[in-house]
Amino acid sequence: MAAAATTGKQKWGWGTANTVAVALTLIPLLWIVSLSFKSPAAITDANPWPKYWTWSNYSGILKTSQFIRPLINSIGIGIIATIIAVLLASMAAYAVARLDFPGKRLLIGMALLIAMFPQISLVTPMFSIERSLGLFNTWPGLIIPYIAFGLPLGIYILSAFFREIPWELEKAAKMDGATPLQAFIRVIAPLAAPGMVTTAILVFLFCWNEFLFAISFTSTLTSRTAPAALAFFSGSSQFTSPTGPISAAAVVITIPIIIFVLFFQRRIVAGLTSGAVKG
Amino acid sequence: MSTQTEVTAGTAQAPATGRRQLSEGARAERKLGWLLCAPAIIVMIAVTAYPVGYAIYLSLERYNLELPNAVKFIGLSNYAAVLTSPYWWHALSVTLIITVVSVAIELVLGMLLALLMHRTLFGRGTVRTAALIPYGIVTVAAAYSWQFAWTPSTGYLSALFNNSAPLSHTGTALAAIILAEVWKTTPFMALLLLAGLALVPEDLQKAAKVDGATAWQRFVRITLPLMKPAILVALLFRTLDAFRVFDNIYIMTGGGNGTGAVSQLGYDNLFNALNLGIGSAISILIFICVAIIAFLFIKGFGAAAPGSDLGRR
């Protein structure tokens, strides 16, 4: 692009700007990592980096069900909600991208509305509904709302994806006698797999990150997810300040996700921007 | 409405285009379309439309969970109670301040970051990778990082500012919350804007450069107008997202020291006051606020509204 015009001075300018940008994104993360390796006594020394490194915060939280159980809940609820949301979104997105039927714009409008919906508006009525249905403080009590909020994202990304698929193949399958449904399952679904993976990643990230529903619709360790458990964390023993354990727990729930995000970064960037920007 | 006639017309013409030989096929297609969408629609209605309807009903009742036998229809009294309460107006102004200030800062920083990712030749991958870290981090974890950083005698930021305790004063606490929001979501803004930047043709920039336009003129006259749709979408998503701010406030201040946004107010009302009636009235009022913001944006979009192209195919 502008390569020819780039002088040494400009190179320096860009380099500095890049370094500043990278540093700013990293500092809060490095800070909580640093805290998680400090001993209880060193927590209050305000040093940006621990003088002596200790694993005690990690071994502490990994021994208590206060953290392990929510971690299992988070993984389970996230995976189940993601699978169902991607499945339902694929069906709807296929219909949107491929079929003619009245009410299509209504579906798109509804998805858009839910993508922008203020979750807090649901907390009070859903709390009441879930209590009367016996869903309060259960896995389904979180899975169902997570599916609903994962769906708009899924329908958007997938319908954008499905429009790029070579549909002649579907026509060919239909010519060979396949019904529309068979054509969908045998021909289109495999082609759509990359889009579905992208959607699954983003929906899972949403479930993993979600906090308001997680603290509102759960009351005990049986269904509380990791971010919610963090907010109610009292530490591995009642005599130590929970700063260290909270930091360690925050690192444990964050690092795998960051590795995951960096590993799939191309897909995530494509997914995040696909629905939003169209020429 | 117009779409329906459009679609019907399309179906009638279908045989001519040869895509569907039989109207029976068209009918089957229509049925399949509905069938495939039905599960998604049912879940979305069950989780949003139905609870909102139920909230409207609850908001007209005196309903305190501590007094389950005193449930009584009281009309709009709950709304009157909320709208005459200073707490509501304070929470609303806090929310609006956080929304406007953080989205404005994010737009500027996001644009700078997008330009950086778009223009830079060395380390572009590194910047993009680093930018995804705030996006990927769990908000609650990041909020704790900020909270500890501002805690006197623990945090590096507090130490930097003479061991002060910014989270215990409304103004500085709001600034700290806005900083946390900006840090977390600027990369998202930047990615949306970067996708818009990619749509600005390079030739146009070159032509303007040949004509002697400065970098700033090119940015204002060419880049910005061409990016308008991308900017509006990014602003809409972020504004409505910022309006629901909850995680950062809950962790950093718990809504104390006058920093509670409307989400915090709704939450506290349910779990501390156990008042379903008032809580539902707050829910509906927040919903109306969001609807107004969305309406204003969509009016601003015109035909560029997100989703309009999807519906039309």
Image (cartoon, coloured by chain):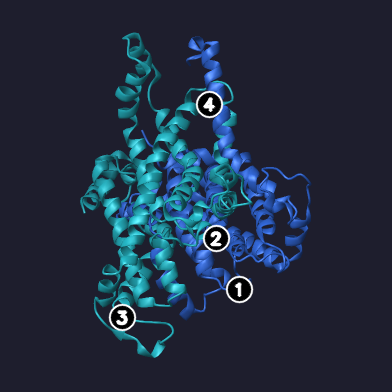
Which residue is under mark 1?
A220
Q: Which chain's residue wears label 2?
A: A
Drawing shade for chain B = cyan
Q: CA distance from mark 1 to mark 2?
A: 20 Å
Please tell me whether mark 3 or mark 2 is closer to you in this view. Answer: 3
Viewer-closest of B55 and B89: B89
Q: Which chain's residue wears label 3?
A: B
Q: Amino acid at mark 4?
A: Ala
Mark 3–mark 4 CB contact (< 8 Å): no
Q: CA distance from mark 4 to mark 2?
A: 40 Å
Left or right, residue A141 beside residue B91: right
Disc 2 is placed on an element classified as helix
Residue A273, percent across and down?
45, 39
Q: Amino acid at mark 1?
A: Thr
Q: Which chain is blue?
A: A
Residue at the spot 31% in from the left edge and 76% down from the top edge: B57
Whether residue B296 is visible here, answered yes or no, is yes
Q: Earlier in the sequence, mark 1 or mark 2?
A: 2
Mark 4–mark 1 CB contact (< 8 Å): no
Q: Are marks 4 and 1 on the same chain?
A: yes
